Amino acid sequence: MRIKSLTARVLLLTTVWSTVALVVIGLLISTLYRKSAERGFQDLLRAQLYNVINSVTIGDQGALSGSPQLGDLRFAQPKTGWYWVVEPLGTYTTAPLVSPSLGSALIPVPSVVEAPFDKNYERYYQVTDASGNRVQVAETEVVLDTDGRAARFRVTGNVDVVEDDVRTFSHSLYLALAGFGVGSLIVNALAILYGLKPLDKARAALERIRAGESEQLKGDFPREILPLANEVNALIDSNRRIVERARMQVGNLAHSLKTPIAVLLNEARVLEKSHGELVRSQAESMQGQVQSYLNRARIAAQRESVLARTDAEPALERLVRVMRRLNVDTEFDLVVSPPHLAVAMEQQDLEETVGNLLENAARFAKSRVRLSAIEAGEDVKGAEASARRRWVELAVEDDGPGLEPDQIREALKRGRRLDESKPGTGLGLSIVTEISNEYQGRLELSRGEWGGLKAKLILPGVTKDVA
């Protein structure tokens, strides 16, 4: 799943990196401490071994004598895993010396092949004593007198001491690293949120532009964001100039064509009926087509502008009030939900599209027309399927005779009139289709719940926030 939030991306990256780094550091320190503890434990056993050696001699009778005092009560307590043993070597025989902690028990001794002596004629190995303790053994052999009589010295220590020490240290280390990690993540999160705060200000400024509350990105932006703000402001100014220039050109063109078309229509009235009707119909068709293409040119010039926004409720209320005055025998209902619904269109384009649909509905309705504007569902999209848009659903429904599917296809053709007895040029629905298409929307015709025609417009709403 792709994360779209810049803050979430940075926080996730720092969290993962901090977690991995702290785990690796914890394992490394714990391993180094274990090696140090094991080395210190072996050095302690070696020191105790030579203390025993210095405390033992061979008497005149050839017997081993001595009472090593190692300063550790564990050598006097049974089954502790802390023992010392002095055994005679060679041809002479005498009783071995053992620590009180060992008593009559024996310590397993591996062969020299399994645990060889080092260059100092010492060897270290681990065995399990009779009490089930895992012990580390330090062993050496020493000649005790000038007659060549020697003895084997062994000192053992309980390995659990090292394990308990390492376990206690690791537990404290992991708790300290966990606390440090949590504190670091909190500090990093605060630093990231503070560092990215100007982006929130820029987003809020863009939302004010989109809502029509401002015309430029305004704010005290840092050096890294200021060029972007300047470029956005330049783009907005450029779009505004393009829109103004297009509107001016459209107005000039409409003004220049208005008079010639009006002259043609006036001349058509004084001509013979057959010729006059032909000229009049063609002039009206030309007038409608010119207006349609002018609208398309104007919309194409400004449809990408971020400033295109119209509040639906006041615009639709004005249209309904006008239609009520023009059609006193027809009831017009208006439903807008939610009340602050906004359409990403120029007001005059929204009024022209909905106005054409209301005129058609009023022309064929028996007594009632309903206009509704709601926020479309997530599965409803216009001609341009964009997840970043909200879509608005406008519906005009009447209680007239309605249209069959083949009649609907015919009605959408430019200049096609299904009922020649009704006034009009037949361009209304095609103009609605063209304007809605220019805004990436669409027009749908179907039979409504009252039996008449239902014209539904899917139009772009205000763009969604992208998290």
Image (cartoon, rainbow, N blue to C red):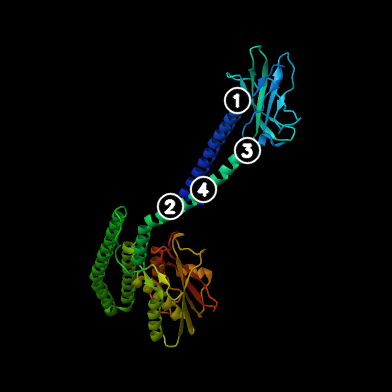
Rendered view: 287 above or below 63:
below
Q: Residues within 10 Å of mark 4 (few under 14, many from 20)?
A: few
Residue in the foreground of this view, choosing between 221 and 73:
73
Looking at the image, tell me whether mark 2 or mark 4 is earlier in sequence order. Answer: 4
Amino acid on which the number 1 mark rests in the picture:
Tyr
**Label at residue 50:** 1
* SS assignment at label 3: helix
Q: For the residues carrying marks 2 and 4, which lies nearer the camera in this image?
A: 4
- Residue under label 3, please give it: 161
Q: Is residue 252 visible?
A: yes
Point out which mark residue 176 bears.
4
User: What residue is shown at x 69% (from left), y 26% (from top)?
Assistant: 85
Specify few, some or many for label 2: CA neighbours under 10 Å numbering under 14, 14-19, or 20 or more. some
Say whether disc 4 or disc 3 marks the residue closer to the N-terminus: 3
* Front tag of 2 and 3: 3
Q: Nearer the viewer, residue 223 or 90?
A: 90
- Is residue 303 in sight in this rendering? no
Residue to which mark 2 is pinned: 188
Q: Residue at x 32, y 78 (%)?
A: 273
* Quarter of the figure with residue 319: bottom left
* Nearer the observer, 12 or 244: 12
Q: Amino acid at mark 2?
A: Asn
Whichever of labels 3 and 1 marks the residue nearer the N terminus, that label is 1
Circle 3: residue type: Val
Amino acid carrying mark 4 in the image: Ala
User: Which comes sooner in the sequence, label 1 or label 4?
Assistant: 1
Q: Nearer the viewer, mark 2 or mark 1?
A: 1
